[in-house]
Image (cartoon, rainbow, N blue to C red):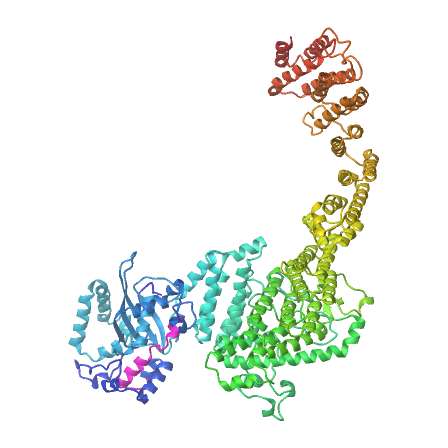
Amino acid sequence: MAERGQQPPAKRLCCRAGFGAAFRPGQRLPAPCVGGVSAAAAGRTHSPESLLDIAARRVAEKWPFQRVEERFERIPEPVQRRIVYWSFPRSEREICMYSSFNNGVEEASSGGESSDEQRLPFRRGIALLEGGCVDNVLQVGFHLSGTVTEPATPSEAELLCNVSVSFDRCKITSVTCSCGNKDIFYCAHVVALALYRVRKPEQVKLRLPISETLFQMNRDQLQKLVQYLITVHHTQVLPTAQKLADEILSHNSEINQVHGAPDPTAGASVDDENCWHLDEEQVQEQVKLFLSQGGYHGTGKQLNLLFSKVREMLRMRDSNGARMLTLITEQFMGDPRLALWRHQGTDMTDKYRQLWDELGALWTCIVLNPHCKPEQKSLWLKLLRRWSSVDVCPLEEGNHGNDLTNLTNVLPQVAPDLLSHPHRTVFTRAIEACDLHWRDPHLQRIITGDHYTHYCYHDDVDSALFDARGWPLWREHVPTACARVDALRSHGYPREALRLAVAIVNTMRALQHTQLELYRAHKKELLHRGLTSITNMEGWVGHPLDPIGTLFSTLMETRRGFEEGAALDCSVFCQICVFEGESLVSLAVETALMGLGQQRAMPDGLYAQEKVCRNEEQLLAKLQEVRLDDTLVKVFRKQTLFLLEAGPYSALGEILYRESVPMHTFAKYLFTSLLPHHADLAYQTALRAMRLPVLESSIGGSDLSRPHHMVSVMPNRFPRWFTLSHIETQQCELASTMLTAAKGDAGKLQTVLESIQKNIHSSAHIFKLAQDAFKISTLMDSLPDLTLLKVSLELGLQVMRMTLSTLNWRRREMVRWLVTCATEVGVFALDSIMQSWFTLFTPTEATSVVANTVMSNTTIVRLHLDRHQQENLATSARTLALQCAMKDPQNCALSALTLCEKDHVAFETAYQIVLDAAATNMSYTQLFTIARYMEHRGFPVRAYKLATLAMTHLNLSYNQDTHPAINDVLWACALSQSLGKGELAAVIPLVVKSVKCATVLSDILRRCTLATPPMVAAHNRRNSGKPTLLDKAPLRQLLDATIGAYINTTHSRLTHISPRHYSEFIDFLGKARETFLMAQDGHAQFTQFIDNLKQIYKGKKKLMMLVRERFG
């Protein structure tokens, strides 16, 4: 990171009146020691550290140099040199922390870094140092300077950077680099210079602060120094030098009122805050930039890295952690999207909301710093209250935050009035944590004593503070106690955090035993009265403070650190690891199981509910990384048994609160973990967890003795379950896991099947389970498992019954799959679903899918049926088809006729069903379709009868000349004409009655007259050449109807005709004339018709002119 301006002058003023007595003016300083060490000392190796170095190092770490000067009138030069020498940071870890997102200096030397890591300032700084790019390094007092050369690249020229660093008490307090880079972190050039000083201190020229050098000069030397300085840098410093000279020569100037002069190399003053350099402006700018980019460019990742950097600073006990978090929070509070979302009534994105959660959790850690000063905590509290009071400050639980606390574990209880509590913001927990303190003697003994047990205190210690084994307990609200653990970890107190974490786990265990005894004492009463309330409205999993995750991480990380050789006192580890053969791993696993199995209410709001699911999945993912050994299996068994027996305190207990968070995901993990070791317990747990009471109706008093019953003491509070779809999916996966494991065990399969049928309420999920069971039972590498196939069939039948009367877009797929499954089971299954089809299928599904599939050749071949079996199956299918046709003739009659073709009696029955339904229940389209089928099958008379029935339902108006039924009418007329004059005579009146469209009637007329029926003789032809039948019935009736239709249609069209339709109208009249001329007196009729038009519509002059031009 580079400063944008020049380094400000030091606040410290240096002046020593008696210094000249020790050194004569102009006297040269003694030859400098290499690296601040004498030549003799430099040649020695393995020598003990001198008392001077020990003392100088301690002073350099803790005391500002001004205090040293004030404490001692004269400080020997060797002492000054050693203090200055030891004041520079000696660890690379802090330099790494301020120059990269990576945690820890150990990553600097790890192999296989990615290209992104190589671009980090810290890595680039190491590369520059190792490449010999650092030169001209000079340490003057508490100021380090040098040049760093950035090698040329194909795209950039070589860059020479002037770098300077100020430091105090082993911390870099300011940096300047001419590269002009703007970032939160130190630039690579600053890193290279600082690491040069850390790794090669003996190669750095060391001088005392410049003020000390100036004190040794006489007037001539000082003047020569100033003049040479001006000469070398006259363009930069000449104006400033002249200005300062003018002020010094003026007796009344401000500069003459102050004793001494500033020295940027003399170190910090007593009043200066001792902290590492942090560019506040860049922090604010970067956070503001990240927030303005919304969800793009990985901004969420960048902000999370900043939060990780804050935690790293806290772990290093760096005061900049709180300072940096304050800057980040101010930018978050100033995000304009907060006001916009509040105005629009929309929720912030999930990832953005998680950032706010982390912000609140970090502030809780900061205010719980066990060694923070009261004035610091007071300042933070003021800030937190100010932020929390802002209208746009996000709420803890989204838009549905409530002040929920753990209820006391006493039975029976009365539910609190949840609506009376105000909303909580993301900072409320931190504000409340400001009231906590660390002064409790018992707490202090827990976190400081490696062997603190009740055996150490016989008389004056409350026995409730220890468990039966004598180990200390910490009876505090569990999330609050875990927040203390997180604070200890975050502030760099891992051993103290571990001690407190173990005490909390022991407390949770003791609480478990108390709860179990309490439930056993009230069990009969509870089961009889059916009254209970959930014991934790605010669960541990999904809690804003993540108590279970904190305990698990603390125990596992400590164990991992011990295995990797971290600096953890072995006695502490041993003291914690020998609880009857336990280990930190077993403690961590048991803690996770206790938290995951806790019965807790589903919180309000989408975000809070998603957080519960996410937190549970995160914990389970961590558990799955742990390899189970015999010890952990015992832990699993112990905790699972407790969860099954703990009643209302466990979500796997007999009494389940209606709105309790389901245990499907957790139970699936328990099932797979216990199955190889304790199969019966695994199934008992998974079956108990299948419950989803929020989808069930309340159970009356008569059912209270049932172990699966649920009760609710808040019948009017049924919050919306936003994550219900996800929950049902997890329930389905749990059931699928049990089905897979139970393959081959008929008893267990039946039990799992009953649980599925009882607890799963989604047809889609039951269908998925049926499909899964089918796939598992018909694996290619093994014979079909008939028992599992029957389970699959049973589930499929349940799906059919559930979706029979509801709309489901997958219904047809479900029906086809069920038939396939029944085919795999055997012929008896197919016959069974056909016998009970009315409870499973609609008539259309039964005929079009079920019966057709059953009678297909594929099914016969698949089942290897003999002729007798084929006939029996076909008889059942035909019976099904006839029943469906009776129930729904409109949609099933044709299918029934098709299926019954090979059975005369059944076919006649189906035909009679069609005739009976034709008058009232069937449309002309359906009847025409069946009529065409009859003609195709060689039954023209039956086709004719059905066509005439269809004609009675048809009605074509004058303007429906493109109606889809026109082809059916033409076909019916052609069929009638082919059968004989009598049939044609019978159908013509129906046509005249049903069809009012002139063009359609004229088309029918031409088709009837151009083809003389074969049974009619060709005599009595007229000399005019016109067809002989037009003047006789039935065609005369058709001709008159056609002419009348043209006349009526003409008048109808002229009523609202527009000029753009004139040409079309003239063509229409041309077609009408052709029809008129088919009559004996047609010409006269048409002439009269045209004259009437010209008289009636004489106002339409242009149109009538066109009529006269065309028709005279």
Answer whether residue 83 is magenta in the image: yes
Do we see residue 134 in this rendering? yes
Answer whether residue 395 is magenta in the image: no
**Depth check, front residue: 167 or 807:** 807
Do we see residue 717 in this rendering? no
**Depth check, front residue: 28 or 584:** 584
Q: Quadrant of residue 230?
A: bottom left
**Depth check, front residue: 603 or 800:** 800
Q: Quadrant of residue 1095?
A: top right
630 with respect to 78 (left or right): right
Q: Measured along the vertical axis of the image, is residue 1026 above or below residue 97? A: above
- Percent x, y for residue 946? 79, 30
- Percent x, y for residue 380? 50, 71
Q: Quadrant of residue 642?
A: bottom right
Q: Measured along the vertical axis of the image, is residue 916 above or below residue 613? A: above
Q: How many marks?
A: 0
- Percent x, y for residue 962? 67, 27
The stretch in magenta equals 70-96
Q: State the quadrant of the C terminus.
A: top right
Q: State the quadrant of the N terminus.
A: bottom left
Most extreme residue toward the bottom is 459
Q: Main secondary structure of the magenta part?
A: helix
Q: Measured along the vertical axis of the image, is residue 247 above or below residue 152? A: below
